[in-house]
Image: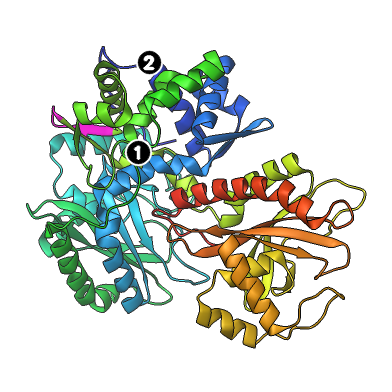
């Protein structure tokens, strides 16, 4: 759950009730870690089972949720909502590169955080590869008093903000509404975690206001220390805070400011110049709204009452925002989505009431709360996790095994696999390695390398005949790799093992780099190579396109590891 609302106003008359109820299902699934039994969602929301089923059916149609047996699971497509907020804010695009350079220079993790009510929400992470490293995710929400950035933002609070903060602490004494942090001790000494980190919050806020920076001395959990400095826009308003995060095994809290503040302040000055630069960031080739009103009409016709139009319309309005579209008037939202003005207006009013949008009466803008809709649970996605459901659907369609592999030196390594059930099947498990040169996935992966790197890897490869069909001629192999690159697939017939045939296509990331390959493997005695190519290549390419679409969405602001 999120932190409790202590004085939530009643919804305005124009608010869309079905949209509000539907979003409660999505929030419950998000705060439940991204996978929940449907029955648990019914209990968590208090809605009828039929209502929850309709909401999940709509979210599945949108590509935001999958229903797997009795469970509902967040899908990578949902990240497009958080992407819309992050792109509209421009903070990761404009400030992220400087944060990465700072992390490299200090060899410490660096975070960008924004204020969100009486909390702090992460919008960018530059982490270090260590056994003990920063575990927060983009979208995670922390209480303002438990961390360095919160004291910087609270320096601008008015009395109403302080009142809401005090009411929230009284209503939630252990920070149960903030699942990203360990619970703190309540007044009776229950649970673990830091004891009363808000007791001296006002004095820490005053110290941060005077010094211009804030220190976190193990406020979140033992051993974690951080220093934060605000980043201000050209009008002098703090729009985010940059934190350098370390561990007491490397730097004591008393030593951290002297060690990092000089370079941190240089980076903040660089970031403030970037915010003042009138040149917008590189345009992102994504439409203002990923779906249109006509798509919703078709979905309604196909799914009937199982499609909740008001939910689809509400989420559609969020995707109207993005790079160069930080604030939009009603007319622009209606044009981007294809919705009638009255329909778009009611959706916007509802989302503003729920806190996902803010407005000045004319222009609407997304708020950090949009990241509450599944961004944090999905931010740890790996490429195999993205691929797995698409591979399963492919296997169900073709009735042969499907796999994903990445290049590891001169080998391929399997990172995802869905076997088929046959009397004679291919017995390969995740983690299995094979030489790249005699495999279909290896060939499309090698074909996707820059020529110099491809040559270097082949030079290190011993072209050993594994069967009588294995290509061992360097010239012939080079020609096959060129062909695979041109045609976009590779078919290998009994070169790795007698009787084994496979066909593979590449998986490309947002920058069109080949990062993985997927294949279908089958027994060579069932059909001719040409028949297998004609039967398998179209569905294999379609599955790869779906994986790439999810990878493009997930990779917009997240690092998606290959395993």
The numbered dot on residue 541 is: none
- Residue 456 on the magenta segment: no
Q: What residue is drawn where x is 49% and y is 46%?
A: 377
Q: Position of residue 455 (x, y in %)?
A: 58, 83
Q: What residue is drawn where x is 46% and y is 67%?
A: 133
Q: Nearer the viewer, residue 315 or 227?
A: 315
Give the image quarter of residue 230.
bottom left
Q: Nearer the viewer, residue 134 or 77?
A: 77
396 to the left or right of 221: right
Q: Secondary structure at mark 1?
A: helix
Q: What residue is drawn where x is 46% and y is 61%?
A: 512
Q: State the residue lying farthest toward the left.
A: 235
Q: Are marks 2 and 1 in contact (CB under 8 Å)?
A: no
Mark 2, residue position: 17
Q: What residue is drawn where x is 28% and y is 22%?
A: 344
Q: Nearer the viewer, residue 77 or 243?
A: 77
Instruction: Quadrant for the N terminus, please.
Output: top left
Q: Secondary structure at mark 2?
A: helix
Q: Which residues are magenta?
A: 357-362
Q: Nearer the viewer, residue 514 or 367?
A: 514
The numbered dot on residue 370 is: 1
Q: Earlier in the sequence, mark 2 or mark 1?
A: 2
Q: Position of residue 352 (x, y in %)?
A: 26, 28
């Amino acid at each position: 759950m999120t932190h409790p609302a202590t004085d939530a106003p009643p919804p305005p008359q124009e608010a869309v009730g079905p949209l509000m109820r539907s979003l409660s299902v999505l929030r419950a699934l998000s705060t439940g870690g991204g996978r929940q039994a449907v029955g648990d969602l019914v209990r968590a929301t208090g809605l009828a089972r039929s209502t929850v089923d309709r909401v999940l059916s709509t979210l599945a149609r949108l590509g935001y949720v999958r229903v797997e047996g009795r469970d509902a699971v967040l899908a990578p497509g949902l990240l497009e909502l958080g992407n819309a907020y992050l792109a509209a804010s421009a903070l990761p695009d404009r400030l992220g590169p400087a944060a990465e350079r700072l992390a490299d220079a200090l060899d410490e993790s660096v975070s960008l955080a924004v204020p969100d009510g009486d909390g702090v929400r992460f919008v960018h992470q530059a982490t270090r590869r260590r056994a003990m490293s920063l575990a927060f995710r983009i979208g995670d929400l922390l209480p303002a008093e438990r961390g360095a950035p919160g004291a910087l933002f609270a320096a601008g609070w008015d009395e109403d903000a302080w009142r809401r903060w005090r009411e929230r602490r009284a209503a939630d004494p252990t920070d149960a509404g903030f699942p990203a942090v360990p619970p703190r001790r309540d007044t009776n000494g229950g649970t673990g975690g830091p004891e009363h980190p808000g007791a001296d919050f006002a004095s820490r806020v005053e110290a941060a206001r005077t010094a211009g920076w804030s220190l976190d001395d193990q406020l979140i959990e033992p051993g974690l220390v951080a220093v934060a400095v605000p980043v201000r826009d050209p009008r002098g308003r703090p729009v985010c805070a940059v934190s350098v995060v370390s561990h007491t095994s490397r730097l004591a809290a008393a030593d951290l400011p002297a060690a990092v503040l000089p370079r941190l302040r240089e980076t903040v000055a660089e970031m403030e110049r970037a915010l003042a630069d009138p040149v917008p960031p590189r345009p992102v080739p994504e439409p203002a709204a990923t779906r249109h009103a006509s798509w919703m009409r078709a979905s309604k016709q196909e799914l009937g009452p199982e499609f909740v139009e008001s939910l689809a319309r509400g989420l559609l309005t969020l995707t109207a925002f993005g790079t160069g579209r930080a604030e939009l008037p009603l007319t622009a939202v209606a044009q981007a989505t294809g919705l009638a003005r009255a329909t778009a207006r009611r959706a916007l009013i509802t989302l503003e009431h729920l806190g996902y949008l803010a407005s000045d009466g004319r222009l609407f803008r997304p708020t950090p709360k949009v990241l509450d809709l599944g961004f944090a649970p999905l931010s740890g996605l790996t490429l195999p996790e993205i691929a797995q459901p698409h591979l399963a659907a492919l296997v169900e369609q073709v009735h042969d095994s499907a796999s994903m592999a990445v290049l590891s030196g001169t080998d391929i390594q399997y990172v995802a696999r869905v076997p088929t059930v046959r009397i004679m099947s291919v017995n390969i498990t995740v983690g299995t390695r094979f030489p790249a040169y005699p495999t279909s996935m290896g060939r499309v992966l090698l074909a996707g390398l820059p020529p110099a790197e491809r040559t270097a890897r082949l030079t290190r490869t011993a072209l050993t005949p594994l069967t009588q069909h294995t290509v061992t001629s360097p010239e012939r192999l080079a020609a096959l790799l060129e062909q695979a690159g041109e045609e976009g697939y590779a078919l290998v017939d009994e070169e790795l093992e007698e009787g084994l045939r496979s066909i593979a296509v590449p998986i490309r990331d947002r920058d069109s780099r080949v990062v993985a390959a997927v294949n279908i493997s089958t027994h060579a005695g069932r059909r001719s190579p040409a028949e297998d190519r004609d039967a398998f290549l179209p569905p294999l390419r379609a599955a790869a396109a779906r994986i790439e679409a999810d990878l493009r969405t997930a990779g917009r602001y997240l690092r998606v590891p290959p395993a």
